[in-house]
Image (tube, coloured by chain):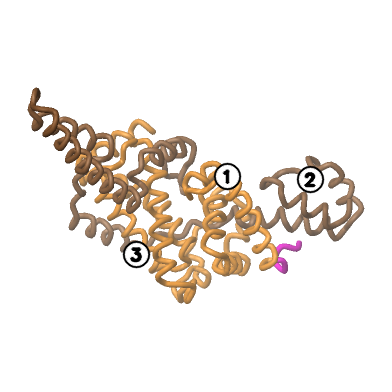
Amino acid sequence: MNCTSTRRRLRGLERGASADVVPGAAEHLAECPACRAWWAGRARLDQVLAGLSQPVVPLELRARVLDAVARRRPRPVYLTGRSAAVAVAVLVAVLVPVGRPRGPRVVAVAETEFRSDSLLQQHAFAVSADPLADAASMHALATVAMRAEWPGGVGQ
Amino acid sequence: MAEQLGEVVERARRGDSASFEALYDRFEPGVYGLCYHLLGDRDAAMDATQETFVNAWERIGRLRHVEAFSAWLRRAAINVCRHRRRKLGRLSWFSEHEPGGDPEETLASTGGPPDDLARGELSQQVREALGKLSTAHREVVVLHYYQGLELKDMAVTMGVAVGTVKSRLGRARDHLERLLTPYLTE
C-alpha cells in the first residue's frame, strides 16, 4: 500500500479509530515516517478539536434574555393536520343535515373538501415555516435527546 | 433527572414562565457555547442565544415530546445561527472582544486535551480555522467535537443523511488539517 491509498483509507476512519482496522495501513505507517507523522497530526487534530473551549457566558446575558422573554407570550397552538381534519369532519357532521337529497349533499362535501384542503395547506405552510412543528422531526429529536447531552454539564 | 426535566418542560409548555426560566438556567451555557462556536463572535452569540430562547418560549406549546426539548432547542439554535450567518455573510468572524486575547474569557473543557491546548496560540488558531470553514462544515465540527454528538444524532439535528454528515465531517477535518498543519506537529 502506498502513501496516497493509505491516507485515503485512514481518512475514512471514525475519530479515534486505530489504524489497525485498515489492512496494510499499520505496516505502511511502520515503514513510512511521513505518513506516520501525518497520522499523528491527524490524531492531534482530533485532540485539539475535542478541546473546543466552553466560552464564559457574559454576565449580562441572563437578564437580557429573560427580559426579552418576559415581553413575549407563548403563541397559541393552532390545529395541525390530523386534528384539523377531525375538526372539519365534526363540523361536517353537525352542519350537514342527515337525509337530505343527494344533490345538495354532494355540493356540501365538495365545499368541505375545499375547506379541508385549505386547512391542510395552512398546516403545510406552518410546517414548512417551522420545521420544529413537524411530528416526524419531533420523534427523531426525541430519540436524539435521550442519547445526547449538552456540554458543560447541562442537559437531561 | 430526565423526569425532572420533563416536568419542568411540561410546566413551561403550559405557560409557566418560572419553569422556562429554570430551563434557561440549565441550557444557557450550552446554547451560548453552540452559538459562539457557530458564529465566532461574542455579541452575535448573545443575540443568537436571546433569539433562540425567545423563539423557544413562543413556540414551546408546539413541542409534542417534552423529552425532546434539549434536541429541539439545539436545532432551534442552529437554525437561528444559520439565519444570522446568511445575513452577516463572512465579513466578520471574531470581534475584538474575543477570548483569544483574554484568558479569562474561556474555560477549558473537561476531559479534553492538555490545558495548554485550550488556551494560547493554538486555541486562537483553531478558532480562526473554524471561521474559514463553510457553515455546513463548521456545524458538523461543532456538533461532533464540542457538543459530542454521534453521527446519527448529528444527522437528525441537521436534517440530513448520516452519509452526508460523515462526508462533511471528513472534508471539514481535511480542511482543518491543512489550515492547522504547522500547529499539529509535535
The residue beneath circle 3 is: B47
- Residue B178 rendering spot, x and y as whole percentages: 70, 66
Q: Classify mark 2: residues with Cα within 10 Å, few (<14), some (14-19) or many (20+).
A: some
> How far is disc 2 from disc 1 in space, using C-alphas?
23 Å
Residue A49 is marked as: none
- Residue A88 rendering spot, x and y as whole percentages: 18, 35
**Which image quadrant for residue A63?**
bottom left
Q: Earlier in the sequence, mark 3 or mark 1?
A: 3
- As drawn, A18 above or below B146: above
Q: Circle 1 — which element?
A: helix
Which hue belongs to chain B? Answer: orange
Asked whether the viewer can see residue A18, the reply is yes
Report the amino acid beneath label 3. Answer: Asp
Q: Classify mark 3: residues with Cα within 10 Å, few (<14), some (14-19) or many (20+).
A: some
Q: Circle 2 — which element?
A: helix
The residue beneath circle 1 is: B162
| Front-lying residue, A55 or A98 | A98
Let me know if residue B109 is in the magenta part.
no
Residue depicted at x 29% and y 39%:
B9
| Residue stretch in magenta | B181-186
Residue A19 is marked as: 2
Report the amino acid beneath label 2. Answer: Ala
Q: Is A21 situated left or right of A78 in this image?
A: right
Question: Marks 3 and 1: which is nearer the front?
Answer: 1
Residue depicted at x 63% and y 52%:
B167
Find the residue positioned furthest to the right: A31
Q: Looking at the colours in the rendered structure, which chain would you say is drawn in brown?
A: A
> How far is disc 3 from disc 2 in space, using C-alphas?
43 Å
